[in-house]
Image: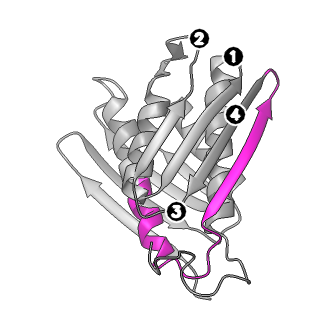
């Protein structure tokens, strides 16, 4: 099988982002977005998904982190779509539960070709440090849309905002790992329609 790697860049008036993704990596991450808590979350996503992930983002963080976080989701989604190619031989579906102390979050993925997400991720505080907690959901929506996959992220228990968001990123990374992995029993495209 070919090594599945993609590099995607996107530059707007608000952000300048380059991401390199290796789906068949070992979890090596080099993350620099100018948003420290978000860097921590992307690192958790890559390490637990076993994706080699380089993210270099410059954004208008002097305004707030919204554009940087959302646009990074867009570019990361595009990198997954490109690296997956025609999706032949992949498992397609992945679902993982991640507990962190009092928190339990489930992420489920279908690499469906249709970009949509449903996030039920209530957090008790508006911020973790300087990070606006509602941006976690914005990231997942942008990521799912541009990766052209169906993503559900659901908090089953949780009281600590940091734990809830971190468990969500870890669960998403692990679910993506399962969905992107090759399944030796799958012949061709894993769809009754013959395409994803």
Q: CA distance from mark 2 to mark 4?
A: 15 Å
Q: Which residue is mark 3?
A: 111
Q: Secondary structure at mark 1?
A: loop
Q: How is the image coloured?
A: one colour
Q: CA distance from mark 4 to mark 1?
A: 12 Å
Q: Nearer the viewer, mark 4 or mark 1?
A: 4
Residue 63's spot in the image, x, y percent?
27, 23
* Residue at which label 4 appears: 105
**Percent from the top left, x then y, of residue 184?**
73, 83
Give the mark nearest the N terminus, 2 or 3: 3
Q: Secondary structure at mark 2?
A: loop
Please identify the residue farthest to the left as the structure is shown.
13
Outermost front residue: 192
Please determine whether, in this image, residue 175 is positioned above or below residue 87: above
Q: Which residue is mark 1?
A: 160
147 left or right, relative to 47: left
The answer for how far apart the CA atoms under marks 3 and 4 are is 20 Å
The answer to whether marks 4 and 1 mark residues whose Cβ atoms lie closer than 8 Å is no
């Amino acid at each position: 099988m070919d090594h599945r790697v993609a590099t995607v860049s996107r530059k707007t008036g608000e952000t300048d982002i380059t991401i390199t993704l290796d789906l068949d990596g070992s979890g090596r991450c080099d993350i620099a977005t100018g948003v420290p808590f978000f860097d921590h979350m992307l690192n958790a996503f890559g390490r637990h998904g076993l994706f080699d992930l380089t993210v270099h983002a410059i954004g208008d963080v002097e305004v707030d982190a919204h554009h940087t976080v959302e646009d990074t989701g867009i570019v990361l989604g595009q990198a997954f779509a490109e690296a997956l190619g025609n999706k032949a031989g992949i498992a397609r579906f992945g679902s993982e539960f991640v507990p962190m102390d009092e928190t339990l979050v489930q992420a489920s993925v279908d690499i469906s070709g249709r970009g949509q997400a449903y996030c039920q991720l209530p957090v008790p505080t508006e911020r973790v440090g300087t990070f606006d907690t509602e941006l976690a959901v914005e990231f997942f929506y942008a990521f799912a849309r541009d990766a052209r996959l169906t993503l559900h992220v659901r908090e089953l228990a949780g009281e600590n905002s940091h734990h809830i968001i971190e468990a969500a990123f870890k669960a998403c990374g692990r679910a993506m790992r399962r969905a992107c992995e090759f399944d030796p029993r799958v012949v061709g495209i894993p769809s009754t329609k013959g395409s994803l």
